[in-house]
Amino acid sequence: MKSRFVFATSFGLSCIFTFHSISAKDPNDQNQFEGTCRSSLNQWIESIAGLRGSEDENIKTQKSSFRDGSFWLIDSTPSKNWDWYLLQPQRKNKLCLIFHTNAFQVRTIERGKHRMIFSKVRGSGNFPSREIDFVFERKNQTFQPRRCSEIRFREGRSFRKKVSCFSFLESEVSLGIFAGVPTRILEGDVPL
């Protein structure tokens, strides 16, 4: 009986702490960089890849399709999902991080007022690949997960299964492998 109580208590506490990390990102958490501004691209490269980051062939930039001049700073180190940092030019010659994720492929779309990011996360071993679609929420000025899918491969064919973004991101956070922790999960569809 005592072991059940200990298990239930520890499980409950881990759920509470995991849920907290998903539901509210600490604005003082500078490890995530989100919302942080730097005065130059070189400062961003140094903060991500160290003092010699500008010499690293795995550090690249790529234009996004967003009309605000945003672009990706990418750490494409082999053997892992890449780190994608979406930087947006601001007033006073600042570059601000507005989104960060780990994925092997990212694509952006802007239609009218709607801005979306589609990311694919490579699985390894028995873990499936995953797709996460993010939509920009103007009220909070953040990208939020909208649609999540797992992709499994069997006998040369792929099988896609829609999963709850909340449970998906909760498992990612508990494993410490998802960097783009959202402030809340959106439900429903966004008209495009």
Image (cartoon, rainbow, N blue to C red):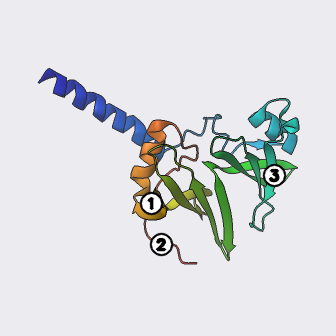
Residue located beneath label 2 in the image = 189
Report the quarter where the C terminus lies: bottom right
Q: Residues within 10 Å of mark 2 (few under 14, many from 20)?
A: few
Residue at (60%, 56%) from the top-left corner?
142
What type is the residue that disc 2 sits on?
Asp
Label 1: element kind: loop
Dot 3 or dot 1: first in sequence order is 3
Q: Are marks 2 and 3 in contact (CB under 8 Å)?
A: no
Residue located beneath label 3 in the image = 61
Residue at (11%, 24%) from the top-left corner?
1
Percent of width and height locating residue 48: 75, 36
Q: CA distance from mark 3 to mark 1?
A: 36 Å
Residue located beneath label 1 in the image = 155
What type is the residue that disc 1 sits on?
Glu
Can see residue 40? no
Percent of width and height locating residue 170: 42, 45
Residue at (60%, 58%) from the top-left corner?
119
Percent of width and height locating residue 102: 62, 47
Dot 2 or dot 1: first in sequence order is 1
Q: Quadrant of residue 16?
A: top left
What type is the residue that disc 3 sits on?
Thr
Q: Residue furthest front?
A: 155
Q: CA distance from mark 2 to mark 3?
A: 31 Å
Nearest the eye: 159 or 86:
159
Q: Is residue 77 left or right of residue 17?
A: right
Label 2: element kind: loop
- Depicted 5 relative to depicted 110: above or below: above
Q: Residues within 10 Å of mark 3 (few under 14, many from 20)?
A: some
Q: Residues within 10 Å of mark 1 (few under 14, many from 20)?
A: few
Q: Are marks 3 and 1 in contact (CB under 8 Å)?
A: no
Q: Quadrant of residue 28?
A: top right
Q: Is residue 11 left or right of residue 24?
A: left
